[in-house]
């Protein structure tokens, strides 16, 4: 069962993240709308403050695509 207080807290944190990084959510929205399909490879590199990088990727299944599109619908057009 979902905890409404936790969901509200998460919503507030998401709104704050989106306010700090509005282009990031628009970028993710664009990718979801234009590039996500079965067999798409998502490739991610994260670099921390010390300059160390971590790289990973995933080849998307039809289920992954459906999940990402549902999250996109839940978040709204630009992640709002």
Image (spheres, rainbow, N blue to C red):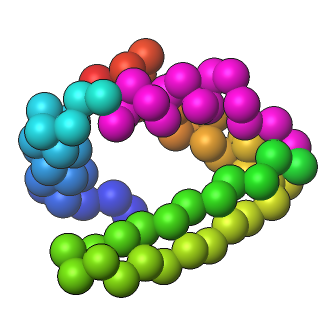
Q: Is residue 6 above or below residue 32?
A: below
In the rendered view, tell whether residue 47 sits above or below residue 43: below
Residue plotted at (36% across, 83% down) = 52
Q: Is residue 25 left or right of residue 21?
A: right
Q: Is residue 28 left or right of residue 80?
A: right
Q: Position of residue 50 (x, y in %)?
A: 22, 82
Of 74 and 44, nearer the camera is 44
The answer to which image quadrant residue 15 occupies is top left
Tell me which segment is drawn in magenta. 24-38
Q: Return the residue found at the far front.
A: 51
Please check the rendered image and state whether residue 35 is part of the magenta-colored stretch, yes or no.
yes
2 relative to 71 in the view: left or right: left
- In this orientation, which residue lies closer to the viewer: 31 or 47? 47
Quadrant of residue 37 within the rendered picture? top right
Taking the spot 87% from the left edge, 43% from the top edge, the residue there is 38
Q: Is residue 62 visible?
A: no
Check residue 30 for magenta coloring.
Answer: yes
Name the outermost residue toward the top: 77
Q: Quadrant of residue 5?
A: bottom left
Q: Residue 72 in the image: x percent, y percent?
A: 51, 32
Q: Is residue 33 visible?
A: yes
For residue 63, above or below residue 75: below
Residue in the image at 21% along x and 38% along y:
21
Residue 69: x %, y % from top left: 63, 34
Residue at 14% across / 49% down in the picture? 13
Query: Which image quarter is the N terminus in?
Result: bottom left
Quarter of the picture containing the C terminus is: top left
Overall secondary structure of the magenta section? helix
């Amino acid at each position: 069962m979902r905890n409404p207080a936790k969901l509200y807290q998460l919503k507030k944190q998401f709104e704050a993240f989106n306010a700090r990084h509005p282009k990031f959510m628009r970028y993710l929205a664009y990718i979801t709308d234009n590039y996500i399909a079965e067999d798409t490879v998502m490739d991610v590199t994260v670099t921390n403050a010390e300059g160390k990088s971590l790289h990973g990727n995933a080849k998307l299944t039809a289920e992954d695509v459906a999940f990402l599109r549902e999250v996109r619908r839940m978040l709204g057009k630009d992640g709002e």
